[in-house]
Amino acid sequence: MTVLERVEQVLASVRPSAICDDCMVHKVKVARRQHTNKKSRTLAERPGYSRAVGTCASCHSTNKLVVWKK
Ligand SMILES: [Zn+2]
């Protein structure tokens, strides 16, 4: 499974809530945070995904950059 597929899987599991990059890294278990950031950015640019500052469904932090599946 590719990182992008794992990111999609994580987003589908929290849907319709959003998840922050830190939790995404933890859930996808990617060592390099930058790598996941790039993947979630790529994902957010695809139809059906959004990215904005909001609340994370996993760690419940507010004002974090989160991504979600619409
Ligand atoms: Zn989080």
Image (cartoon, rainbow, N blue to C red):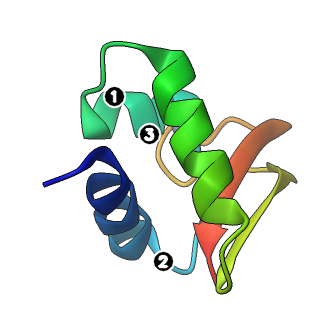
The disc placed on residue 15 is: 2
Tell me the tag on residue 24: 3
The span from disc 2 to disc 1 (Cα, nearest Å) is: 17 Å
Residue at 48 percent across and 26 percent down: it is 35
Label 1 crowding class (10 Å Cα cut-off): few <14, some 14-19, many 20+? Answer: few
At 60% across and 36% down in the image, what residue appears? 38
Q: Is residue 70 above or below residue 9?
A: below
Instruction: Indicate yes or no: mark 3 CB to ligand 1 under 8 Å.
Output: yes
| Residue 43 x/y as whole percent | 58, 61
Mark 2 and mark 3 lie on one chain; the one further toward the N terminus is 2
Which mark is on residue 26?
1
Task: Report the quarter where the N terminus lies.
Answer: bottom left
Q: Secondary structure at mark 1?
A: helix
Inspect the image, locate mark 1, and give the three-letter code of the amino acid beneath it.
His
Q: Do tag 3 and tag 1 residues touch (Cβ < 8 Å)?
A: yes
Residue at the (29%, 66%) spot, across then down: 9
Q: Quadrant of residue 29?
A: top left
